[in-house]
Amino acid sequence: MKLTLRLAHDELEMNRISSLKIMNELAPHMGELLCESFICPEIRSLSIDELAGVRQAVTKNMINATKIVSLKYFNQHIYPMYERLAKDSDEKTRKGCAEIISEIAKCSDL
């Protein structure tokens, strides 16, 4: 996990994207507490990355963690991030949000 967190803060776009893919795969094995404490904060941080490619990767790699967190955490942190990404200036990021809307809806009580 330490290496993945280091990759999430790397200056290379490719490494930040790789960290998202790894976190998405790890999330189902980490449990709610670790997802809320480590994985989701990193995903949220990368969701505001200056590079559109990283934000696009967030939309493709956030679902597993989204399914693990509590409803309260989802409503306070994940859904606002999703809403912001759905209004992103980058068309591919918005498209990525549209592609996962059904999965987001399954996690929400909104």
Image (cartoon, rainbow, N blue to C red):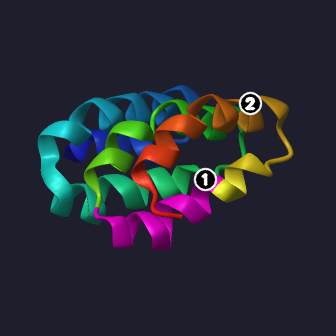
Quadrant of the rendered image containing residue 91:
top right
Residue 61, percent from left and from top: 46, 33
Nearer to me, 50 or 107:
107
Q: Earlier in the sequence, mark 2 or mark 1?
A: 1
6 or 62, nearer to the observer = 62
Which residue bears the numbered disc 1?
82
Q: Looking at the picture, tell me which residue is in the foreground, 70 or 35.
A: 70
Residue shown at the point (40%, 61%) measured from the top left: 41
Q: Determine the image quadrant of residue 73.
A: bottom left
* Residue at screen point 14% across, 46% down: 30
The reply to whether residue 12 is visible in this rendering is no
Q: Which residues are magenta?
A: 70-82
- Vertical side of 59 occupied by 106: above or below: below
State how many labels appear.
Answer: 2
Measured from the top left, where is residue 56 in percent x and y?
A: 64, 33
Question: What kind of secondary structure does the magenta stretch mostly adopt?
Answer: helix
Q: Is residue 98 left or right of residue 101?
A: right
At label 1, counting other C-alpha atoms closer than 10 Å, the crowd grade (few under 14, some 14-19, many 20 or more) is many
Residue 33 in sight here: yes
Q: Which residue is mark 2?
A: 95
User: From the image, which quarter does the C terminus lie in?
Assistant: bottom right
Label 2, secondary structure: give it: helix
